[in-house]
Amino acid sequence: MRVIAGQFKGRRLKAPRFEGLRPTSDQLRETLFNILAPHVAGSTVLDGFAGTGAVGIEALSRGARHVTFVERDPRALKLIARNLDACGIVGGYSIIRGSVMRASSLLIGESFDIVVLDPPYDIEDLSAVVSAVAPLVAEAGTVVLEHARRRHAPTDAGPLVRRRDVRSGDSALTFYAAAA
C-alpha cells in the first residue's frame, strides 16, 4: 500500500498483519480520490472504519484541512498511528477509538465535508451506518460507502440520497448527498 498522490505521494503504508482488516486497495482509493478531487483541498474528512488510515492519509496528502479517524480495533489504531508517523504527519487529524455509531454521537455539532465509510463487507445494516453519520455531513457534503459489490447499498439513508455508484472488482463505492 502506498499514498497515491499529493504531498506524501509514494510513501509506503503498513498493511495489517492480523485477520479482520481489509484495506481499501490502491486502485479503489485512486478511483475514489479521482472523483472527490475537486472537493478535498481545505475539507474536513471523517474516515469511518479507518482500518489502516490509508483513506484519511490520502485526504491529508491531497490537502484536506483535518481528518478524523474512527476505528474500534486497538491493533488498527496502532497501525493508523504508525502510518501517520511514517508519513511525517504531526497535525491536522484526530483519532477516535470506538464504533462509527458511538463516534457519531460524540461528534454532534461537528460538520464534515467528506465522510468515507468502509465497514466490514458482511455488516448487516448498511443503511444504519450511513444514517448514523448523516447529522455530521456539511450542507454540500458527500458520504461515500465502500461495500461488497454483491451487497445493495441503500437508496437513501435519513436525509441522504444515493447519487452515484462505482464498481471496481469485488468492491463498490456508493456516493450520497443531501436530498435537494
Image (cartoon, helix red, strand yellow):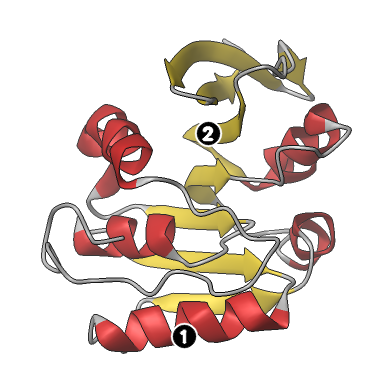
Element at label 1: helix
Which residue is located at x 82 percent, y 54 percent?
Answer: 101
How crowded is the residue under tag 2: few (<14 C-alpha within 10 Å), some, or many (20+)? Answer: many
**Residue 170, relative to residue 19: is it above or below?**
above
Residue topped by disc 1: 81
**Residue 60, relative to residue 154: is it above or below?**
below
Q: Which numbered circle lies on residue 144?
A: 2
Amino acid tagged 1:
Ala
Q: Would residue 27 be visible to someone looking at this image? A: yes
Q: Would residue 91 be visible to someone looking at this image? A: no
Amino acid tagged 2:
Val
Q: Nearer the viewer, mark 1 or mark 2?
A: 1
Quadrant of image for the C terminus: top right
Looking at the image, residue 76 sits to the left or right of residue 44; the answer is right
How crowded is the residue under tag 1: few (<14 C-alpha within 10 Å), some, or many (20+)? Answer: some
Please report whichever mark, 1 or 2, sits nearer to the chain's N-terminal start. Answer: 1
Q: Report if the CB atoms under discs 1 and 2 are less than 8 Å apart.
A: no
* Residue 145 quadrant: top right
Q: Position of residue 141 (x, y in %)?
A: 48, 35
Which residue is located at x 53 percent, y 44 percent?
Answer: 116
